[in-house]
Image (cartoon, rainbow, N blue to C red):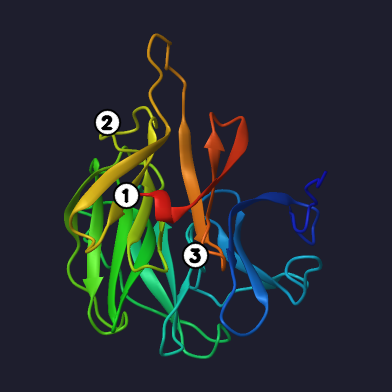
Amino acid sequence: MVYPEEVVNGVQDDGTRYACWNPVLFKPRKGPLYLYYKVGPSPQEWWGMYMTSKDDGKTWSEPVKLPEGILGPIKNQPIHLENGTILSPSSNETKSGIWTMHLERSEDSGKNWSKTESLNDPKEFGAIQPVIFNYGNGKLQMLSRTKNEVIAQNWSDDHGKTWSKMTATVLPNPNSGIDGVTLKDGRQLLVYNPTNKNWGDRVPLSIAISEDGKDWKRILDLEPIRKNTDKEGEEYSYPTVIQAKNGLVHLVYTWNRKTVKYVTLNPNKLH
């Protein structure tokens, strides 16, 4: 049996201990494995950190703070484009309740970063925690969690250098985190809660598939609504998803805020 091991904590030089938030693992095509995370008393005051591993997570470097103004991937993985650019989906939450999302960009394998301006108007969409889908030839889509009971989107046709205005998708969102991956066969896989009650029940937790990012087909409920039970308090949320080299899709998500559930899927059977 494999047991979890602590690799980092939020203990500061003066002994103060802060929470470590939203860990994100990322493996570029060349170089070490990265562990990005945030440290701080709240999402309004946290800062970005990372560690690296040269042996696929068996051992880790000392933590390094990201440059001022760079938070790293807020919840979902960066992507490594065909041209070598790394794009990291990120966002900000202010003490006054303003949510904005942006993109952080590296041309040198994560050594240096730049970032875009906010890619949403918070008066129209309060948006955070984007995920990036790659359609090839420079065409990208970002989907974001919002306060507006809908998943919102931005598009780029130039490898993420410029982005369209944020618009609504057809996908509902109960102000809950999402994640997804561009499958090796070119389809887009999204994990989300398909309800639109603001801060309502985060159940069911489902998978949708799309060929073009516009038309989405909900094909599987990982956690369905259970009939004849009191579902009050049920919550299945905050998914993370990757596709392994062998093609299998690996998913983890919070299960009723009590534990973490792990699921493996064969995408060839998802239609």
Name the residue type under label 2: Lys
Name the residue type under label 1: His
Q: x, y (%) of residue 215?
A: 18, 54
Name the residue type under label 3: Gln
Q: Which residue is drawn at 38% across and 42% down?
A: 176
Residue at disc 1, secondary structure: loop
**Can the viewer see residue 236?**
yes
**Is 263 above or below relative to 169?**
above
Q: Which disc is residue 93 wearing?
A: none
Q: Residues within 10 Å of mark 1 (few under 14, many from 20)?
A: few
Front position in the image: 24 or 17:
24
- Check if mark 1's residue and mark 3's residue have beta carbons within 8 Å: no
Name the image quarter holding residue 179. Answer: bottom left
Mark 1–mark 2 distance (CA, rounded to whole Å): 27 Å
Q: Which of marks 1 and 3 is nearer the N terminus?
A: 3
Name the image quarter holding residue 94. Answer: bottom left
**Is 81 above or below relative to 269?**
below
Question: In this rendering, would 48 be left or right of 271?
Answer: right
Q: Which disc is residue 77 wearing?
A: 3
Q: How crowded is mark 2: few (under 14 residues within 10 Å), some or many (20 or more)?
A: some
Residue at disc 3, secondary structure: loop
Q: Which disc is residue 271 wearing?
A: 1
Mark 1 or 2: in front is 1
**Can the viewer see residue 95?**
no
Q: Which of marks 1 and 2 is nearer the N terminus?
A: 2
Q: Which residue is drawn at 77% across and 58% down?
A: 7
Task: Give the tally of numbered discs.
Answer: 3
Q: x, y (%) of residue 264?
A: 55, 48
Residue occupied by mark 2: 197
- Check if mark 1's residue and mark 2's residue have beta carbons within 8 Å: no
